[in-house]
Amino acid sequence: MAVYYILKDEVNEMKELNQADPAYVEAMTLYMSGQWKEAETAFLALEKEYPENTFLILNLAQVYYSMGRLDDAIEKNLQALEINPNLGIANYRLGVCYFRAGRLIRALESFNAVVASSSQSHAMARYFVGLINYFLGNDSDADVAFTEFRGISKESMIANFFLAQIKLKNHDHQAALVLLDELAAETPKFSEVHYMLGQAYYGLHQNQEAIRSFQKVLEINPNDSRAKTKLTLMTDLDW
């Protein structure tokens, strides 16, 4: 289960709660232990007492998300945003709900709202902006978002993978090669990376390097028919 922490300066209604209240303590205990149905009942009771408290509303939204009740989770996140339109965490969670529900355009709107804000969730929001634009075929927007995500989360290599695919698609083989070299160093057993390296080298007319990359693919995955075909064409050998 993914646990998201909410900053006090982002959800300032939290101060209205009596955190010593046994009902609040019980609700949080149920929430943290993953007893979703019981937590729902407890938070609904607290919400009646604190109807404008976005902390409670967001926790209830997360309970519904964890139960797979995406429509209810969306409704609660929207409720929190009506109270405080600047809640980056609500927009982020809303984007995740829409994404999981397959509502990509609405998800993109929510994640873009996070990116436009000062929320600490902006790094992963950029990842989702890149991913959704990639799915929608908006290569330019995806490139920008993944590039920004890569700059913020330097330890993450997932942006390299998608950026390299975009670069290869647009015949920018040298840029793809740089991204793929970094990715291959971190994931040497990822056969798809070596296949993409082969494509990049082939596009740069570095055929020997391309052959070695396709051979590496087959070392990792002997059944990769694409690599076999590429090697057959490049070496005129039967596989």
Image (cartoon, rainbow, N blue to C red):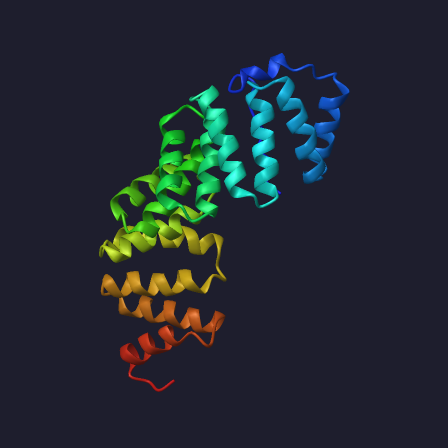
Residue at the spot 49% in from the left edge and 27% down from the top edge:
79
Figure check: 187 above or below 77: below
Asked if residue 187 lies left or right of residue 200, the reply is right
Near-viewer residue (91 or 79): 79
- The spot of residue 133 in percent (x, y) is 32, 46
Residue located farthest toward the top when viewing the structure as drawn: 16
Image location (x, y in percent) of residue 140:
25, 44
Quadrant occupied by the N terminus: top right
Along the viewing direction, whichever of 17 and 123 lies nearer the viewer: 17
Question: Is 175 in front, or is 60?
Answer: 60
Is 204 rendered above or below residue 212? above
Q: Residue furthest bottom?
A: 238
Q: Residue at x 61, y 37 (%)?
A: 63
Q: Position of residue 174 (x, y in %)?
A: 26, 53
Q: Position of residue 216 (x, y in %)?
A: 43, 69
Residue 120 visible in the displayed image = no
The relative height of residue 5 versus residue 192 in the rendered view (above or below) is above
Question: 138 and 173: which one is in front?
Answer: 138
- Count every numbered label the image shows and give the total: 0
Q: Picture quarter containing residue 124? A: top left
At 37% from the left edge and 65% from the top edge, which residue is drawn? 195
Residue at x 55% of width, y 18% of height: 52
Using the rendered image of the protein, determine whether residue 59 is visible from the camera's viewpoint. yes
Can you say which quadrant of the picture contains the C terminus?
bottom left
Q: Is residue 103 above or below residue 80?
A: below
